[in-house]
Amino acid sequence: MARYGAQFGPDITFLGVAPCDWANPETYADADVMILGAPFDGGTTNRPGTRFGPQYIRQSCYLTPNGSRPSLALRVDALRDLKVYDAGDVMMYSGDAERSVRDLQHAVYTVTAAGAIPLILGGDHTIAWPDHTGVARQHGFGKVSMIHFDAHADTGDIHLGSLVGHGTPMRRLIESGALRGDRFLQLGLRGYWPDEEVFAWQAERGITSFFMHDVRDLGIREVTTRALAHVGEGPVYVTVDVDVLDPAFAPGTGTPEPGGMTSLDLLWAVREIAATVELVGADVVEVLPTAIGSADITALVAERVVREILTGLAFRTSPARTATA
Ligand SMILES: [Mn+2]
């Protein structure tokens, strides 16, 4: 199969990194990291449109797409220090959730098995199920911890009559054994969902949650330190729902919940995690573009989340490593 490219809009790559075809590992044999778009919003329960997330995240930067982004805070240039490719989007039809989830899992597994760390641009949060599963198929079921940034727990059972959706991926992961409850950590929960029944289910499986009021009271550094201590050694998958941010920072999302995190805190936290753990994959989901170009602040901050993960990764192996700013 030849490179499929972008499902919507022009076939541009993330910040100008080299293109490749995920189905052909020979085209990215030396890859450290793979950007992969997952333009699926068939699991959305409210406002749709996250199928355009990958397209808008890729075009949100105001600088030249030259494959270089030196970090002022850490003095590393992840796009040059690491070998980063962009495989374009996995072909996903939002009207066929079963096929889309299967095909994305296959793509993520293929990339992971070839030795690259997949960074997936969503799409709604349904994709975390095939994303983590694809990674776990390579690293071992029950072996890959998950740090989950979100306003919502996403451990619902059945939504609108379906097992597949953006409110249920974490329950599917735990039921299948891909993810162990005691290796699953949620960060930023708030609002009015889910109910006690779901939290009782979570407690039975040893799931740990840090709520937004914990972030408010303890501060992001303390919460992140505790999160890192909880996941401990071994491979870690990070999933970032942009609705963990306050709607003031990320209004472009389907289920916005007031009282959320600041961009400054989230960007620091994802970078700190990527700089500390054995990161084996990550996704950034639920970007619902509302405007074109850098005027779209939600796509803008989502793209920076990806960039800070890359910066943390580069910093982890950098000889210049000292302390993070
Ligand atoms: Mn979510």
Image: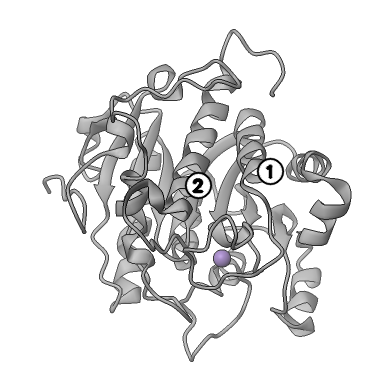
- Residue positioned most to the top: 319
Q: Is residue 175 left or right of residue 101?
A: right
Residue 322 x, y percent position in the rendering: 69, 13
* Residue 182 figure quarter: bottom right
Categorize mark 2 by other alpha carbons within 10 Å: few (<14), some (14-19), many (20+).
many
- Residue positioned most to the front: 295
Q: Is residue 299 above or below residue 81?
A: below
What residue do we see at 33% from left, 45% from top?
A: 58
Q: Is residue 36 above or below residue 163?
A: above
- Residue positioned most to the bottom: 161
- Could you give the CA–CA distance between mark 1 and mark 2, rounded to whole angstroms? 12 Å
Q: Is residue 119 above or below residue 190?
A: above
Residue at which label 2 appears? 301
Residue 283 x, y percent position in the rendering: 48, 50
| Model colouring | one colour
- Please state which of residues 217 and 153 is positioned toward the viewer in this rendering: 217
Residue at which label 1 appears? 265
- Please state which of residues 101 and 195 is positioned toward the viewer in this rendering: 195
Q: Dividing the image into 4 quarters, which one contains the C terminus?
A: top right
What residue do we see at 31% from left, 68% from top?
A: 100
- Please state which of residues 101 and 250 is positioned toward the viewer in this rendering: 250
Q: Earlier in the sequence, mark 1 or mark 2?
A: 1
Q: Given the image, on which type of amino acid does mark 1 rest?
A: Asp
What residue do we see at 48% from left, 91% from top?
A: 161
Q: Is residue 141 above or below residue 194?
A: above
What residue do we see at 60% from left, 22% from top?
A: 73
- Residue positioned most to the left: 2
Secondary structure type for disc 2: helix
